[in-house]
Amino acid sequence: MAGNWKLLVIFGLLLSASVVRIAAEDEAPAAGEAAAADASDDAEDFDEDYSEADKAHLIVRKYFKDELGVQGRNLTVYLEIYNAGSATANEVTIKDSELPEGLKLIDGSLEAHLGKVDVGSSVQHSYVVVAEKGSFGAEFQSATVTYQPELENKEKQTTTSSAYGIYIMTPVEQITRYALIAGQYASLGMATTPAHWRNLAILAAIAAVAIVGNNTYKSVNQKTTDRKRAAALKELEKEQ
């Protein structure tokens, strides 16, 4: 009887070990698949991080060297492209927006192929316009830049420049501006606008009238005194 119990205990232990081993074998593929999936996700995240970090970043600036434009005078528009990224930008092209009304293109082009822009370097494009009228603000809209990333099988990227506005003067306004600048220095900064000069002119006219009037009064008064003195001398001569 005791021998039968021993056999039952041994059989139970063997049966339990088999069940545990089968469960472990069933869980192993699932764990392996999960680990493989995690590794795949990590690889994708790494590729995304790498592609985000290793790419070109173009900064496009539109500007003028002239502070103001003048009707009938040439005005140069500059477009500068700087690569602030960590990869070269290839096949860089630029296309500017249409010119503001009142301006005409006389030299250069609104479009250009600029080749490649290396990391930390810049390229520049320019064209020349002339204003057919004056006394208005010209608003230059953003230019569009397209480039091919350095990595293969990547779509072309697009960015835009800053916009820029500039005032176009008439020749008369330019002369007036130069006169005001000169007058500002001459007046030690007291006259900086036409209104200031008008007020100064009024004050100068009032001062001139006062000075002329005072001199005239003194002259008349002196003549009267001289006549009285001459008349008194004649009376004295008659009495003698």
Image (cartoon, rainbow, N blue to C red):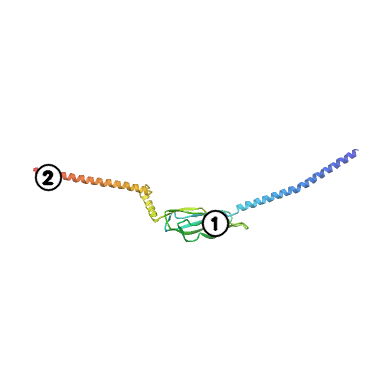
| Residue name at image x 76 percent, y 47 percent | 28
Front label number (1 vs 2)? 1
Q: Position of residue 127 (x, y in %)?
A: 48, 59
The quarter of the rendered structure image containing the C terminus is top left
Residue 137: x and y, percent? 45, 53
Looking at the image, which is closer to me, 126 or 202?
Answer: 202
Asked which secondary structure carries label 2, the reply is: helix
- Label of residue 145 in the image: 1
Do the residues under discs 1 and 2 have CB atoms within 8 angstroms?
Answer: no
Name the residue at 80% across, 46% down.
22
**Residue, x 9% and y 44% (percent of image)?**
238
Q: Which quadrant is home to the N terminus?
A: top right
Q: Residues within 10 Å of mark 1 (few under 14, many from 20)?
A: many
Q: Is residue 146 left or right of residue 171?
A: right
- Hey, which residue is sitting farthest right in the picture? 1
Q: What amino acid is at disc 2? A: Lys
Q: Residue furthest bottom?
A: 107
**Nearer the observer, 36 or 206:** 206
- 22 lies above or below 113: above
Q: CA distance from mark 1 to mark 2?
A: 102 Å
Looking at the image, is 79 positioned above or below residue 211? Answer: below
Asked where in the image residue 113 lies, by quadrant, the reply is: bottom right
Q: What numbered label is drawn on residue 118?
A: none
* Amino acid on which the number 1 mark rests in the picture: Val
Kindly identify the residue that appears in the image at 11 percent across and 43 percent down.
235
Instruction: Pinpoint residue 169: horizontal percent, then vertical percent.
Output: 41, 54
**Residue nearest the viewer, comparing 238 with 198:** 198
Mark 2 Cα shell of 10 Å, populated few (<14), some (14-19), many (≥20): few
Residue tagged by mark 2? Answer: 234
Q: Is residue 133 left or right of residue 119?
A: left
Looking at this view, name the residue that lies furthest to the top: 2
Element under label 1? strand
